[in-house]
């Protein structure tokens, strides 16, 4: 049986309502994503799960590896910037919605989705955003 493991430690919470983990600058209060590793300067904070689609496009060709770590069999995917209120704008894949149904201002929520498997058969999980009115994708 394979385990689910995060693509990176400290990037998001797991569970039925996953959230991204950002970092708040202890001096200025500015929030960044992902949380920088400098714990003396940045405090880890759970970001809002829900946000609003700020902008988007479709990735129609397989990006260079590295940094691309997705499946070998490439399929175009939507990618967007989602504004998480009073926090930050995050770039991530969009899931659970047809390209022609995506609209600026669309209510979105953080979801987890499988990316690929590692050499041990573990499922590598990453985050994405899905329309808020759709059942959360949490495979």
Image (cartoon, rainbow, N blue to C red):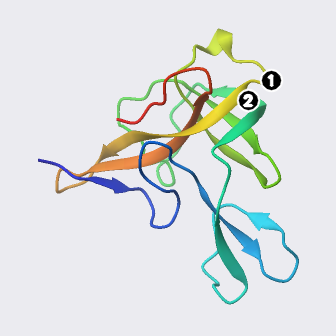
Q: State whether residue 41 is above or below residue 101.
A: below
Give x and y (percent) for residue 77.
55, 26
Among the 4 quarters of the image, the one containing residue 57: top right
Q: Secondary structure at mark 1?
A: loop
Q: Residue furthest top?
A: 100
In this picture, residue 79 sits left or right of residue 64: right
- Residues at circles 1 and 2 in contact by the CB criterion of under 8 Å: yes
* x, y percent for residue 19: 56, 51
Q: Residue 20, percent across and down?
A: 59, 54
Task: Name the residue tied to disc 1.
Answer: 104
Instruction: Give 100 or 29, whichever is nearer the viewer.
Output: 29
SS type, badge 2: strand
Residue at 34 percent across and 50 percent down: it is 124
Q: Position of residue 44 (x, y in %)?
A: 63, 72
Circle on res. 56:
2
Residue farthest front in this picture: 16
> Closest to the observer: 66 or 121?
121
Judged left or right of residue 93, residue 125 is left
**Mark nearer the viewer, 1 or 2:** 1
Which class describes the residues within 10 Å of circle 1: few (<14), some (14-19), or many (20+)?
few
Q: CA distance from mark 1 to mark 2?
A: 8 Å
For marks 1 and 2, the one nearer the N-term is 2
Query: Up-down: is 26 above or below 32?
Result: below
Q: Residue furthest right?
A: 28
Quarter holding the C terminus?
top left
Image: 11 above or below 55: below
Going 68% across and 49% down the picture, which residue do you hit? 48
């Amino acid at each position: 049986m394979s385990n689910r493991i995060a693509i990176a430690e400290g990037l998001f919470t797991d569970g039925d309502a996953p959230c991204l983990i950002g970092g708040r600058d202890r001096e200025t209060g500015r929030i960044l994503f992902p949380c920088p590793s400098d714990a003396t300067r940045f405090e880890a904070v759970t970001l809002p799960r829900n946000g609003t689609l700020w902008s988007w496009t479709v990735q129609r060709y397989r990006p260079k590896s590295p940094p691309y770590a997705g499946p070998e069999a490439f399929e175009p995917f939507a990618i967007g910037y989602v504004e998480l209120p009073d926090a930050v704008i995050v770039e991530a894949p969009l899931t659970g919605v047809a390209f022609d149904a995506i609209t600026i201002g669309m209510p979105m929520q953080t979801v987890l989705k499988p990316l690929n498997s590692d050499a041990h058969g573990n499922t590598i999980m990453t985050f994405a955003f899905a329309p808020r009115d759709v059942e959360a994708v949490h495979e």
